[in-house]
Amino acid sequence: MSTASSSAAAPRAEAEPFRPFDTAFDEHRARAILRDAVAGAEDGELFLERKHSESLVLDDGRIRSAGFDAAEGFGLRAVRGAVIGYAHSTHMDEPALRRASETARLAVAAGGGTLADPPAGTNRRLYTDADPILDAPFALKIETLRAIDDFLRARDRRVVQVTASLAASLQQVAILRPEGQVLTDTRPMVRLNISVIVEAGGRRESGSAGGGGRIGLSGLLAPGHWQTVALEALRIATVNLSAEPAPAGVMDVVLGPGWPGILLHEAVGHGLEGDFNRKETSAFAGLMGKRVAAPGVTVVDDGTLPDRRGSISIDDEGTASSRTVLIEDGILVGYMQDRQNARLMGMAATGNGRRESHAHAPMPRMTNTIMEAGDAEPGALVAEMKDGIYAVGFGGGQVDITNGKFVFSCTEAYRVRDGRVGAPVKGATLIGDGPTALQHIRGIGNDMALDPGMGTCGKQGQWVPVGVGQPSLLIGGLTVGGVA
């Protein structure tokens, strides 16, 4: 549903508590139904969710959309071996729960399993449980979007179009385990995004910037914050106005810190998720304990960073999130695991069992995937290049998990000759494969940075928020696709 309100009254920041066993189900009967569903299974849970979200988009001086969405429901899962029985419903009542139990049980009807030990859970809180939608009046949100448009047009006469969007949501989950546990988490999320198009001499170019996290909305609405974001979007657009056609060929590439870690996320991170390795469809399958990257390369997945977009206090199975070392000094030492794949592989769950919503079963997913810093000065990495590309920003990309082959487009990149950063280039794509790129890392900067909070990861039709981070990296022998 979509509604809009212009009330400027002081917001109420507290979220209404999510108590499904007070309002929708009797906890004792729900647990009995769940236990019947998982009888003879090895795992299972009842995942209950309530989520509401608000989004506002200004385009070319006008509010294009203002929406509010609310949904709730449950998913019931029974697991035996590699088989999953799953049923979900938006009807939060006992008859729907009983039907879901009967459906999920069909997959484990043969029985013979013993329930795995339950997750330990945690009382740790990595982010506020306040509702970010209520953190600022609706009128202030509209005023801020209009102020962004006015600010950019006044700043540069070449601006011909501005698109600015605000999004805020609150997801509340409760996980009922057959052993009797009830684990809960309240997850806020906010994001501001600004895109600008500039025109000069008949040429148009664009730039965008933004970010957010599991924080309140008011910080994004502060002029000191959104003006910085707006100026960054404008800077990228104006840089692209003078960009030259990108070269093509095999050459050295320096990746900038922060958001360029999305290449690491896609080309390497997915290949280190447990399900792909259990099924031996990953390029890293069977390489545990072996060198998969250059010395000095350490990659971790860390869901415990406070307020970050990819962080979770507990995953969607109830396991506490963790800092999982995946590659240590170039050696493969770990995978990201949910409970099912960890059990089948004889490993420990790492708190990476995530799902998009109650309508989806959990699977191993990244949280905040980061390459740790080295000791090189970033300028020295660039100075080492004879002829190459300095890639600062990335757009979309594609990856084949089975071999790690990737293609990524650059949104901001520069030509480097004889160690000097030259003109910006347009139309550059980076082509390679993750395992080879890891081995060809020749320098790791001391400037590790996290992305500003704008990543969303897709896998098997499910989308979840994620974070990335890395220092500047010198990689030898990447193929650069261009037009020159």
Image (cartoon, rainbow, N blue to C red):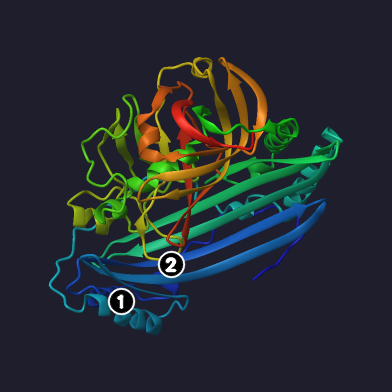
Closer to us: 145 or 296? 296
What number of labels is visible? 2
Query: In x, y percent, where is residue 317?
Result: 33, 59
- Look at 72% across and 48% down and name the residue there: 164
Q: Count neighbours of disc 2 (C-alpha within 10 A) and say few if under 14, some if 14 to 19, many if 20 or more.
A: many
Picture coordinates of residue 202, whole percent (x, y): 85, 40
Tag of residue 358: 2
Q: Residue furthest left?
A: 112
User: Which residue is at 71% across, 61% downward?
Assistant: 66
206 versus 254 height, above or below: below
Q: Amino acid at mark 1?
A: Ala
Question: Which quadrant of the structure image shows residue 441?
Answer: top left
**Callout 2, which amino acid?**
His
Q: Secondary structure at mark 1?
A: helix
Quadrant in the picture for residue 409: top right
**What residue is pinned by disc 1?**
104
Q: Is residue 399 left or right of residue 26?
A: right
* Distance between the alpha carbons at the discs numbered 2 and 1: 14 Å
Q: Position of residue 278 (x, y in %)?
A: 25, 54
The numbered mark at residue 23 is none
Q: Secondary structure at mark 2?
A: loop
- From the viewer's perspective, tell me whether residue 125 is left or right of residue 254: left
